[in-house]
Image: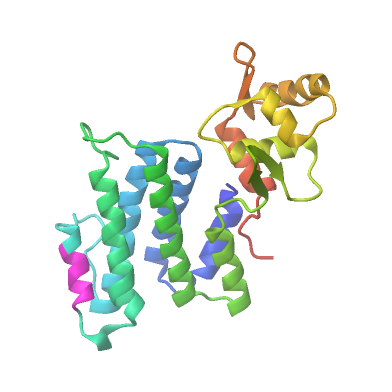
Amino acid sequence: MNTKSNDLALDTALAGIQTAFRTKIIKSYLDIKRNCIESHYESAGIAVGKFCEIVLRLLQSKIHGKSIPFGETVGNFADECRKLVTAPVTAGNESERVVLPRSLVYLYTMRNKRGIGHIGGDVDANSIDVATMARVADWIICELIRINHGLSLEEAQDIVDGISVRQLPDVWEVSGKKRVLKEGLKARDEALLLLYSTRCSAVLLEDLCDWVEHSNPSVFKNSIIKGLHKGRFIEYDAETDSVVLSPKGAVYVEKNILCPLKVE
């Protein structure tokens, strides 16, 4: 993920939020996204916990006029959110008072009850748990942008859309195959995008070549796959003849192939 341009876009989009909260929210959110992409599930869970507690403090500040100081432990997270939900209607808009606190409770509960960020958890963290938490964090950021954006409505919507699109509309799965719909990509970038869409598992080289529709499997392997392997964008296993995307490759796809979140 293009952290630098994302940071700039989010800082602008969330300009209506006090700096003390804004910078911490952005950092923890980007930590969630980066660790999710790189399959660092425990680190993603830790970032989720920080994200929830920072957003909680922001909402407390806006609804109650004061918040639990940074550095002071949040006691019962659900109770603190309940205090927001039961605040007078005149204390703030419904999203900040009711909807966002309830989404935070769900997110915080997922983080605490799914063996993420805790030693000896009953359930091992897995990709679908972390992906779900990342999507909820996406929604929370989108809602904060909607309420607090310092951009034109069109610019804010572009950023919201960019965060929200995680189903890779540029990749189409049909009849057991995958096809890249995004035009203008070289075979190298098509291969990386396809691997990104299947990054939780290895892909047989034969299948990847078929998905790219490369005319010469030998050239595809020797000129493209081995070059990507050497650059550490992928890991090619000659024994199983399979390929998996590396964290470096995932960052490349986020930055150069998918639509980055940036303000022109």
Residue 255 at least partly seen: yes
In the image, 130: left or right of 7? left
Q: Quadrant of the C terminus?
A: bottom right
Where is residue 173 drawn, in percent x and y? 63, 44
Q: Position of residue 9 (x, y in %)?
A: 57, 62
Identify the residue at image location x=26%, y=84%. Answer: 91
Q: Which residues are magenta?
A: 79-86
Of 165 and 255, which appears nearest the observer? Answer: 165
Residue at 40% in and 57% down: 136
Rendered view: 191 above or below 88 = above
How many badges with numbers are in the image? 0
Q: Residue 117: x, y in percent?
A: 28, 39
Task: Residue at the far top: name it.
Answer: 239
| Residue lying furthest right | 215
**Main SS category, magenta section:** helix
Residue 152 in view here: no
Any magenta on residue 82?
yes
Q: Is residue 230 left or right of residue 83?
A: right
Among the 4 quarters of the image, the one containing residue 141: bottom left
Of 68 and 189, nearer the camera is 189
The residue closer to the viewer here, 215 or 82, is 215
Task: Say above or below: 29 vs 143.
Answer: above
Q: Quadrant of residue 196?
A: top right
Q: What residue is drawn where x is 69% and y is 47%?
A: 257
- Is 1 left, or right, of 72 in this rendering? right
Judge whether residue 214 is colored magenta: no
- In this view, the residue farthest toward the bottom is 90
| Colouring | rainbow
Q: Position of residue 13 (x, y in %)?
A: 53, 69
Q: Is residue 233 above or below residue 70?
A: above
